[in-house]
Image (cartoon, coloured by chain):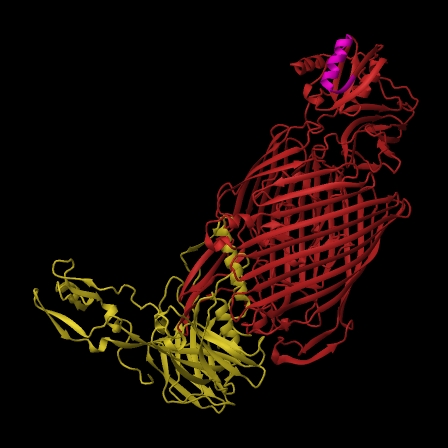
Amino acid sequence: MRWILCLGWILGLQWALAQEKVSTISIAFENSSLKEVIGTIEEVSDYHFFYVEEWLGDHRVSGSYADTSLDLVLHDIFERTIINFHILPGHKIVLTRNNIIRSDLPQVFYGKTEEPALGEEVETNPVFYTEEYNSEKMETVRIGKESPNTRQGRFTLTGRVRNIGTGEFVSALAIVVKDKNIGTATDDNGFYKIELPAGPNLVETSAIGIQTSVRRVIIYNDGVLDLEVRESVEILDEVVVQADATKNVAEPITGVAQIEVEKIKTIPLVLGERDMLKVATTLPGITTAGEGAAGYNVRGGRIDQNLILLDNAVVYNPSHFFGIFSALNPFTTGTVNIYKGSIPVEYGGRLSSVFDIRTKEGNVEEFAGEASLGPVTSNLSLEVPIVKGKSSLLMGGRATYSQWILRSLKEESLKNSKASFYDVVARYDHKINDNNAIGVTGYFSNDAFNITSDSLYSYSNRLFSLRWNHKFSDKNTASLLLSNSQYRFNIEFDGNSQNDFDLGYKIDETEFKLKMRYLGGKGHSFDYGLSTKLYNVNPGSIEPLGPESILETRRIPKEKGLEAALFVSDDFDLSEKLSLSAGLRYSMFAALGPSVQRIYENDVPKTQETLLDTRTYDKNKVIKTYGGPEARLSARYYLRPDLSVKASFGNTFQYIHTLSNNTTASPTDTWKLSDSNIKPQRANQFSVGLYKNFDDNIYELSLESYFKKFTDIIDYKVGADLLLNEDIETEVFQGEGKAYGIELLLRKNRGKLNGWLGYTYSRSLIKFDSGFDEERINNGEYFPSNFDKPHDISLVANYKLTKRYSLSTNFVYQTGRPVTFPVGRYIYQGQNHVFYSERNEFRIPDYYRLDISINIEGNHKIKKFAHSFWNISVYNVLGRNNPYSVFFVSENGSIKAYKSSIFSIPVPTITYNFKF
Amino acid sequence: MIHQFNGNVWRSRIFRTVLLVMFGGALNGCVESFDVKTETFEEALVVDATITNELKEQEIVLGRSFLLEEFDFVAEENAQVRIIDDAQNAFVFQETTPGRYLSTSPFSAQTGTNYQLLITTQNGREYASELTSLPPPDPMQNLYASRTNGDNGEEGIAIFVDFNAPESERYYRYEYEETYKIIAPRWTGSQVVFITPAQPEILPAYANEHICYNSNASEGIIIASTNGPAGGTLTRFRTRFIDREDYILSHRYSILVRQHVISKAAYSHFELLEKFSGQDNVLSQSQPGFFRGNMYSIANSDEKVLGYFDVSSLSEKRIFFDYADFFPGEPLPPYAATECDPFVAGFATFPTIADLLKDNLVRYYSTDPLTEDISVVLRGCADCTVFGDPEVPEFWID
């Protein structure tokens, strides 16, 4: 009831601007709740409090005061809370959450007198008013005195920003003028300087861990405005970093998608696994070959054309369980940036995209953790400060209990089987001093299957990365990066038969990278550096298992290669409207010995018959080098302040290829380095787009179109054996491809209803032509690739019903992917066989799916031990039986057709998460 | 590469893994079969031609492709078929039964000669094979049976071939014909004849229903090569595996294994055929596609022609063994007919014994000396001709 009173009272309030003289009180309390203290104060004085009880939380205070000003007492009581108090005439004390009700302008004003324009110096929103900047007020400040002589368009505002909670000055706080593309950040000492156009400006401040706030600054002249900001009070709630609201329009590069992991937590889940990469596939230009398929196709590129980085180290197979789950822990991941158009100059070596996945930095102030319980896995992450304020350790682990599920099944054949996966990640950050910081990340993921009693199948990713950031001066910074990644798989077949074997594959790479940044004058920002990467591939060995086995040990010789690059780029503004990002990367690759290279006749298919000679190379002798310049150019031009046009061109080289003759990815696909017989793949991409923000950057609209040309992409002869094949070049041929498309994305970033709607029209076509029949597919014409899905619609929407309840939905529609179908049957040597159409002549039926979830936040009591979050999802609500693949099997002389689907009925899931 | 070891061994394991997990409910995906319907039917000529170095009337089978939902062989009739060699000798083939063409005179393929198959179909289209030659003869080394375990751990008898190729690369295709003795377990050599329903008379009969022989030809593609993990020598290559529970092992068994030495190209073709008729992995289907053999259309090189023209060096070996050689004193496998217990039949039972005999469903087994009840057994238990032929094959050695 009290808050209703409070509400009515505030609405009708006529502010009295002068603060009355405050009386003194004597009071003592020990470990009391705020409510008790307030009660005591009300008893011992004639003051009366107005507040919402819920706000007080479980916070407990102690203190003893004698004849102390009430002002001071209240200050102490509420110091460590989010409550502000205001003493009003008539012995009334109003408590508000977050807001400070000011009765006068801050003292910090630069000596000038402020003339209240309409007697309304302070504008407050009712404290319970909830909207995007909820529990914030919009404060209006006026700077300077309007001088009739000033005709200047812009004035300089300077000031210093302090954190009210800690009293410290806040560095790296973004200060952005909404809708005007003006922005700055505070320096290390919390100072800032920004030029504002005369008149009203909406100045927004934001930084990690700081509440975003907006002030209306009406500027008449140069002036000073010191700001006070708060830590994000509800550390429990997600920290939405409004890094730069105008990024969509302002950034001079095309084809970038960002996923903030905290923002996707409400998206419906399949089997309870929150998955950033799966969310990525709801953005235009990023698809998978099918539900549950491993790997991503970005703008018509094959799955091996993505550079997937976790804290700068490559993850070769970021999936668990054949691609149904992603292998990256969602709790330890901060952001995922996907570059599908302009790829930053520091990255290279893959044709189509870079997935730059960053783990979170651990909390350096206090211990925190997060855990989830889902039907398939449990997940725990911990953030441990090591040296308070300086270093922290972040650890995350996830494991499945499918093992337990399998064991509890009645089916005898499944009881003794095994299907498990886990992944662990750890990151340590240490800030040595203001100029030096180091960080280390380690990651390991593993999958193992053993369902039939005679085979064990496993694969694992391992990576390690080290970074050292150094600041030479305000203008010169450097990062030194060292990383190592390894991917391996192993198949053990032990069926007590003569074919028992143990088969293994391993790839290992180590990269060293130095990147430097120089902030030149006039808005130039130079990035430059170099990187080298050493690959060691162990393409496999097979060993007989047990004495019965008739197989003999066979090893495919190791491969070694060195990739190196030099890069430089400059981002600068040519004019107020035109901004450029121009970069050049020179990459090269050397295939290294020891090796035996086979030399074939020129211009004929490589076969045993056309083999001319073999040449032996000693250790570290260069077998073959490839390389070339890679351009990374893009530009942005403002048509209007909130409307821009951008264009970009980039070319890329790729020296490492997956060998896969499956229609979709399999964990046993191997990676092969370029050598004297396999050339690097190359691509050129042009893109152009229009970008517009609406309504205070609440809505972002982008329309982007691209054309991409591939050269020397790899394909295989029908039925090629790629595993353990020593002369793989006889099964491989190289051709060309083209991909083009138009991508439309509408995002609503804030508000009760938020989410995005994307539509993509795209084609991905490949062509393998040759004078020789065996190296030609579909008569040498362009034909659709396995992941050519022209129409793709994705909707991701989240509706906040109340502060605690929200409703989310996904809808996906895609054209069915191309398949090769049998077109007839025949009898040969007494057996029935089918024969197939030309490659990818048909399509499987269109794919669509609707998912719904309800999310329930635990209540927001501040000092509650843990903050909980429930997600109840139903995946595939419509129960659409989306075919994943269609295949044909000869069984006892007759042909059976099968279609497989992964999730053919609605899949309900409940997941429980809590943070502490 | 030994043919059993190709990607499919483990790929099919993975397939099963996933399939089982999904059926098991850990995921609720599913694999369901559906009726095949040809979306776009493509008609193609099918050439099944293997000539060997054996002097005989060589045979070539010509057929056509048919709809996926159909099963029966479609013959290519009235074609003109001939094989020409380097010396322009032509061997002409004549159609004997629909689609089946025999050379008008016996001939054998010779080493060092190239052969080309030429076909003109009745609609006037012309087809030719690539030039194909006879691989060097390489007689089969060793053929033997051995008691061992099968792929799923079951016990049984495997028929192994050893070969030892002097050169590094040899490719083989195997065919076999197995013949086995069948002894009807409830055979009595007697029959019951009813003069009146009350007056049964037992007479000797059915002498030729006691012991029979039956033969089966191999199905599917059995190929091996020395270009694999085992190098130039291959011991214990398994051409056939018989579960010890299989009744064909019960008494005496014989197998004739024919070894074709084939070209690498033919081997690759058979390997592909096999690959695309095997099981596939649900989650990553291996890329299927059309692959041609060595036949092509002269007028239109894009026309699909199926099958293969193969020239092979043939050698063969036969072995015999008894069940007791490998399982002495152990119980025989169950007989082909599973229900062999005698049962009483008379005129009061339904159907009556007369009906059972008239419909040739049972054989007389015994008469109870006390009650004079007549017992019969199902015919298969006493009549081996249900499963074979009483005539002793020419090659049979007891």
Question: Residue A346: horizontal and vertical position, in percent?
Answer: 78, 54
Q: Is residue B36 above or below residue A775?
A: above
**Number of disc labels:** 0
Q: Is residue B359 above or below residue B212?
A: above
Question: Residue A731: horizontal and vertical position, in percent?
Answer: 60, 71
- On-image quarter of the N terminus of chain A: top right
Task: Specify the quadrant of the image occupied by residue A263.
Answer: top right
Question: Residue A626: horizontal and vertical position, in percent?
Answer: 75, 67
Task: Specify the quadrant of the image occupied by residue A575.
Answer: top right
Q: Is residue A793 above or below residue A798?
A: below
A846 horizontally vs A346: left or right: left
Looking at the image, which is closer to me, B198 or B278? B198
Magenta span of residues: A29-48
Chain letter, yellow in picture: B
* Viewer can see residue A288: no
Residue drawn at x 59%, y 82% is B168
A68 horizontally vs A248: left or right: right
Q: Which hue belongs to chain A?
A: red
Task: Specify the quadrant of the image occupied by residue A666.
Answer: bottom right
* Viewer can see residue B101: yes
- On-image quarter of the C terminus of chain A: top right
Question: Residue B23: horizontal and vertical position, in percent?
Answer: 47, 51
The reply to whether the magenta stretch includes residue A35 is yes
Looking at the image, which is closer to me, A607 or B368? B368
The reply to whether the magenta stretch includes residue B389 is no
